[in-house]
Amino acid sequence: MSTARLHITLVSETFPPEINGVATTLGRLSEGLRQRGHQVELVRPRQEADGTSADELQLLCRGWPLPGYPGLQWGQVSMHKLLRRWRRQRPDVLYIATEGPLGLSALRAARRLGIAVVSGFHTNFQQYSSEYGLGLLSRLLTHYLRWFHRRTHSTLVPSPSQCLELERRGFDNLALMARGVDSQLFNPGRRNQALRERWGLGNDDIALLHVGRLAAEKNLGLLQHCLASAQRIYPQRRIRLIVVGDGPQRSALQQQLPQAVFCGAQRGEALAEHYASGDIFLFPSLTETFGNVVLEALASGLGVVAYDQAAAAQHIRHGHSGALAMPGDAEAFIDACNWLLEDPETLRRVRLNARQHASRQGWPMIVEQFEHHLREACCQDHNVPRQAAPLMIKPESSTHRG
């Protein structure tokens, strides 16, 4: 089996310390590849925290605001700049995580130089478009994404449901690569009673938690309905909604939910404490390619309520390690939340099972799979021996409905 060191270039419009699923995933993959001995170059837009010093393993380009989505940006770099850079120090393989102008420039430069390219499908931009008044462009955007990904060796997709959806839309050369979670960082032992007291909750009270970017495509109006239903059915219990995250919808949500606690964006151990101090995690999004927060909530020992797709379908067994609803069935979603509240022993059992499952979903196995996909692509054009595929661990099935 080869242990040849690769020069890998990651191309992305977003990267830590930005807070979103794509940035989190790429941060973990980049760190894991370096730990496995590879040289990792990063091409991304310049962030506010970046200084002016140059870095031979990092090409920072100009960023432009993404229309309708403050805080995120497109990256732009000339193809000729990439050609000059990669002629001087040629990568073995590129991984393009985003399909905007930066990703397109990188794809064109790599094809000009004959460098192998693997792409990732991280964001459902074709679904997001309708949420931002661009519904008429959805078909054109799907056509562009299909064109883009067909020009790469393979497209890595995080969940079986997303893979099926893309196949239906005419995408090909798809490969499944799941996501992991740091179960040492995210664990029930970080529960903080002082934090719960600041939320106005005692030991036996219930914190309905949501973590994520507060944006239109996340279907966050359902949080209000879940809270109202739970408080109506269980008037004897103190139930409070805790919202962690920031985004363009925050002001509107604060007006709709004056009794909810808005904690803003959290990182690292503070984020882990917020997770562990909750009880039930509500994830109503219908547009996720995966949803890293689902695994983080499971690892933190929460009872997760989600639609039966993406990460939830892959990692939750209904009635055993969480509660699932058919996609788009808002009433079933609300009922699933109320079912977890019905019996404290049921919630305790579900939370234990959630933690047990998530603790087995570590990043090292995911990084190994990622490395295999990169080697598979570059060995077609270079003298890099092909590695045997790492063992794939089949996730628990979500077909059982308890």
Image (cartoon, rainbow, N blue to C red):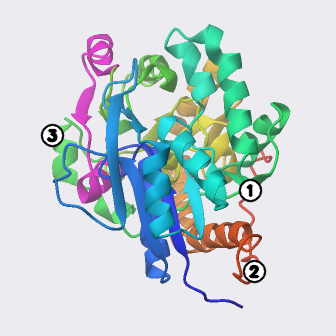
Q: Amino acid at mark 2?
A: Arg
Q: Is residue 28 visible?
A: no
Q: CA distance from mark 1 to mark 2?
A: 15 Å
Quadrant hosting residue 136 = top right
Q: Which region shows up in magenta? A: 249-275
Q: Are marks 1 and 2 in contact (CB under 8 Å)?
A: no
> Residue at the spot x=71%, y=18% of the render?
139
Q: Amino acid at mark 3?
A: Arg
Residue 87 percent coordinates (x, y): 50, 64
Q: CA distance from mark 2 to mark 3?
A: 54 Å
Give 172 or 75, whichever is nearer the viewer.
75
Residue 216 part of the magenta-drawn span: no
The residue pinned by badge 1 equals 153
Contact between labelled residues 3 and 2, with CB atoms less than 8 Å apart: no
Residue on which disc 3 sits: 198
For disc 2, the marked residue is 386
Give the amino acid type for the residue marked by disc 1 in the picture.
His
The C terminus is located in which quarter? top right
Alpha carbon distance from label 3 to label 1: 51 Å
Figure disc tally: 3
For label 3, the SS is: helix
Which circle, 3 or 1, is nearer the viewer? 1
**Dot 2 or dot 3, earlier in sequence:** 3
SS for tag 2? Answer: loop
